[in-house]
Image (spheres, rainbow, N blue to C red):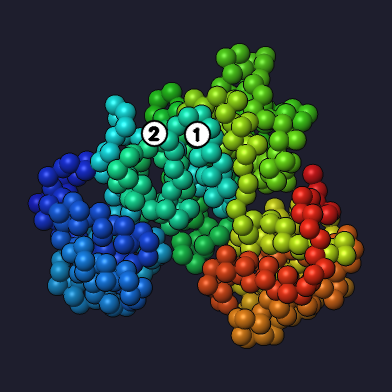
Amino acid sequence: MVDAAPTPAGRLDGLDSWYAEGWKGLNVAVLGLGASGFSVADTLVELGSEVTVYAPEGPSDTVELLDVIGARFERTPLDAVPAVLEQQGPDLVVVSPGLPPHNATVQWAVANSTVWGDVELAWRVRDKVVRGPVAAPWVTITGTNGKTTTTQLTTAMFEAGGLRAVACGNIGVPVLDVVRDPDGFDVLVVELSSHQLHYLPTTGDGALVPLASTCLNIADDHLEWHGSAEAYRAAKAKVYERTVMACVYNTTDDATRRMVEDADVVEGCRAVGFGPGIPAPGDVGIVEDVLCDRAFAENRQSSALELATVADLEQAGLASPHMTMNVLAAAALARAAGVQPAAIRSAVQGFRTDHHRTELVATADGIAWVDDSKATNPHAATASLASFDKVVWVVGGLFKGVDVDGLVERFGPDVRGVVVIGTDRAPVLEAFARHAPGVPVLQVEAADTDQVMPEAVRHAASVARPGDTVLLAPAAASFDQFGSYADRGRRFAAAVHEHLGGNADGDTDGLPGERA
C-alpha cells in the first residue's frame, strides 16, 4: 500500500465519482505511457484535469494523440526525478504499473504528492455509465498463474448467464477504457497483477469493494519489482480486502487460505474453496467425473449442484490439472454472483483457451510440439511439465530474480532432453548439472532473435522420440530476446512448421502423452 503525503488543501477530497467537481483543473502527472498510461491521461483530460505525461519514450502515434486530446508530454527518463516534474508540483501522480516502488521518481511522488494507480482511478469514476440502479460490480482475479484464463472463463460464464460482462485490467484492456464505454456493463471481471495491487489502497474512497475475489495460487515471482517474496505476497493478498459476497481460495494452496483469513471483508462475506477433490460443504470441487458446487446449493450439507463434467473440459481443452483448477475458480466466482449452473456448463463447453497456453502447434512422427510460452515463471512451468509424460523441454529467458533450481530438481531427471534459450543460461545449466547430469543439455547459441527458435527446434528434434512432447515452457520472461511471450510463442510455432514442412499431422484434437 502506498502511504503518500496528503495533498495540500485537501484537493482530492470527494473525488469518488465521475461527476465530482474536483476533477476540473486538477494538476496531474502521469508516469509512463503504455496502454494504461494513455487511458489515464485520456480519462483525466475528459474530466477537465490538467495532465502532463512523463515517459522515456512512447509510440509516435500515441504521443501525437496526447497532443490531440490536450495533454502535455515530457520525454524524459524516470530513473531520476525530472526537474520539470518537481517544477510542476502536481496535486496527484498516477503511476503506471510497470514502475516499481523503488523507482526514484515514484519515491519522490510518494513523498511529495498523492500516488494512485490506474485501477484506483477507474474505481473512483466507475459510475460514469450505469445500466442498473448502481455502478456495475467488479469481480477481481489475481494469482501467480492462471489469471488470464480464469478471467476469460468467468467472463464467459457471466455472458452465458445473460449479463453484459467484460474482461479487463491486466488482461490487456485498461479498466478506464471499460468504465467509459457508452453502453456500460452489468459486471466487470478485472484481472489484477501484483504491480497493480501494490498501488491500490485498502481503505478510503479509492479502495475496491469487489463482489467476489480470488487469488488462484501463489509462488515467488516478480521479486526484483517488489523487493521480496513477502512484499509480493502482501500485494496479492490485497485482492480479498473489502469483498462483499465470496473470497474464493485454493484448497491446495494454504497461503491463499491464510490471505482470506487475514482479510478485512464486508460482514457476511463467505470463504469458498476450490480444489480437485471432493468438495466440503461451502466449497466447489470434483466428485468422480462431475464438477460440483457445494457452496451455493440450498442444501449444501447433504447435496451438490452439477456445474460441468470432465468430458466437457476435455472437449474444450481444459482437462489438464491446472486448467481444471481455473474452471473451478471461475465457477465459484460466477456462482457467487448468481450465475446458474446451466450457464456455467454452457460457457465451459463453448470455451477455447488463448494462444501460447499449452497450445498444440503440430504433431509429426508421433511427436507433439506444444507452445506454453505463457509459462513465464517456474510455477507456471510446473503446471505445464506435470501435464505430459515424456518431454523435451525448451527453457530459459529472463528469470526476474526467481530461482529455477527447484523446478529442475523436480522435473529435470525425467525429461528426454533440455534445450536452453536465453541470454543468461547459467541458472538452468548449473541446475541440470546438479540434479540431472545424465540428461542431454543443448544450448541455443544464436544471438539473432530470428535464429533463436529455428536453432531450438533443430536441437529439440535431434533428441525427441515418438511419444514425446517438445514443450516450450520457458519458466522465464521473454524480454531478453523477444518482444513478449506471444512473440516468443509465435516464433516457436513458425520454426516448428518450417522444420516439419509438410510432415505435420492435421489432427490436433489431442496431445500425445498428456496426463489426465
Judge by depth and name the residue closer to the eye, 139 or 203.
139
The residue shown at (63%, 63%) is 373
Q: Residue at x 33, y 75 (%)?
A: 60
| Drawn side of residue 236 relative to residue 104, left or right | right
At horizontal 62% and vertical 86% (from top left) the residue drawn is 447
Marks 1 and 2 in Cβ contact (< 8 Å): yes
Question: What type is the residue that disc 2 sits on?
Answer: Asp
Residue that extends furthest to the right in the rendered view of this protein: 466
Q: Is residue 265 visible?
A: no
Q: Which residue is mark 2?
A: 186
Which amino acid lies under the numbered mark 1 shown in the image of this protein?
Phe
Instruction: Please report whichever mark, 1 or 2, sits nearer to the chain's N-terminal start.
Output: 1
Which quarter of the picture shows residue 44? bottom left
Question: Measured from the top left, where is residue 243 in percent x and y?
Answer: 42, 34
Assign a secondary structure to mark 1. helix
Task: Say above or below: 512 vs 237.
Answer: below
Q: Check residue 375 in the rendering and tell me which mark sits there, or answer none.
A: none
Element assignment for label 2: loop
State how many labels appear.
2
